[in-house]
Image (tube, helix red, strand yellow):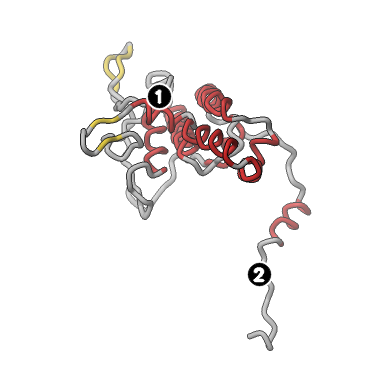
Amino acid sequence: EISGDKVFSAAYAHELPAFGIKHGLTNWSAAYATGLLLARRTLSKLGLDKEFTGVEEADGEFTLTEAAETDDGERRPFKAFLDVGLARTSTGARVFGAMKGASDGGILIPHNEKRFPGYDMESKELDAETLKRYIFGGHVAEYMETLADDDEERYKSQFQQYVDDDVEADGVEDMYTEAHAAIREDPWKKVEGSKKTKEEWKAESLKYKTARLTKEEK
């Protein structure tokens, strides 16, 4: 049936705090984690999460999900195609981080390595260590260390939330490692917290309500 777009499964970066990623929700590493979350949810929904585990320990290597051997014979993986829409598609763009996460999560997404961080256009080779560093927030940790040494005040200002939660540069990789494991354990996990009352939701919505113009203002 073709009658317009239908959403089969979705995942959003703002859901990542449920898995331990509370800061930097717009960086490359968060995009990867969101893609991983989407893949594990999708395969769980299809009952394919046990047969197709993907790359359980991300290593930055280029891989494509292959068919799996089951008791009933060979089973083909769930296949999806990347539609970038109007997103930026230069090397290192976050859309490819989400794609890599979904691919490592066990979904077959036809692609190559040319737009990943670490790909060298001259040698036409992918430096897996560089890509792995991006997956686990190594580039963020490196910047944190540099900024902390060069400008402590700016560091405290830019990474205030990290500082408040005692997340230091040397703990960033562990944060993402634990988050990936948590996503694989339960991709449907929700952020724990008290539910808002009707009055609280009403007050929240009023923040974004545009005031009507008076006749004079019009």
Which amino acid does the dot numbered 2 rest on?
Thr
The residue drawn where x is 21% and y is 34% is 124
The crowd level at tag 2 (other Cα within 10 Å; few <14, some 14-19, many 20+) is: few
* Left or right for 142, reference 162: left
Camera-near label (1 vs 2) is 2
What is the number of the mark on residue 210? 2
Q: Residue furthest left?
A: 123
Q: Nearer the viewer, residue 186 or 142?
A: 142
Q: Is residue 111 visible?
A: no
Q: Point out residue 183 in the picture as x, y percentages from the top left corner.
A: 52, 27
**Residues marked 1 and 2 touching at CB (< 8 Å):** no
* Left or right for 191, reference 66: right
In the rendered image, the quadrant that contains the C terminus is bottom right
The crowd level at tag 1 (other Cα within 10 Å; few <14, some 14-19, many 20+) is: some
N-terminal of the pair, mark 1 or mark 2, is 1
Tell me the CA gap for discs 1 and 2: 46 Å
Q: Point out residue 205 in the picture as x, y percentages from the top left corner.
A: 69, 58
Can you identify the residue that label 1 sits on?
48
Q: Is residue 213 above or below residue 32?
A: below
Q: Point out residue 166 in the picture as x, y percentages from the top left corner.
A: 68, 30
Badge 1 marks a residue whose secondary structure is loop
Badge 2 marks a residue whose secondary structure is loop
Q: Residue furthest top?
A: 71
Q: Nearer the viewer, residue 200 or 60?
A: 60
Q: Residue furthest bottom?
A: 216
Which amino acid does the dot numbered 1 rest on?
Leu
Q: Residue furthest front?
A: 150
The residue drawn where x is 56% and y is 36% is 144
Q: Point out residue 44 in the picture as x, y percentages from the top left corner.
A: 46, 27
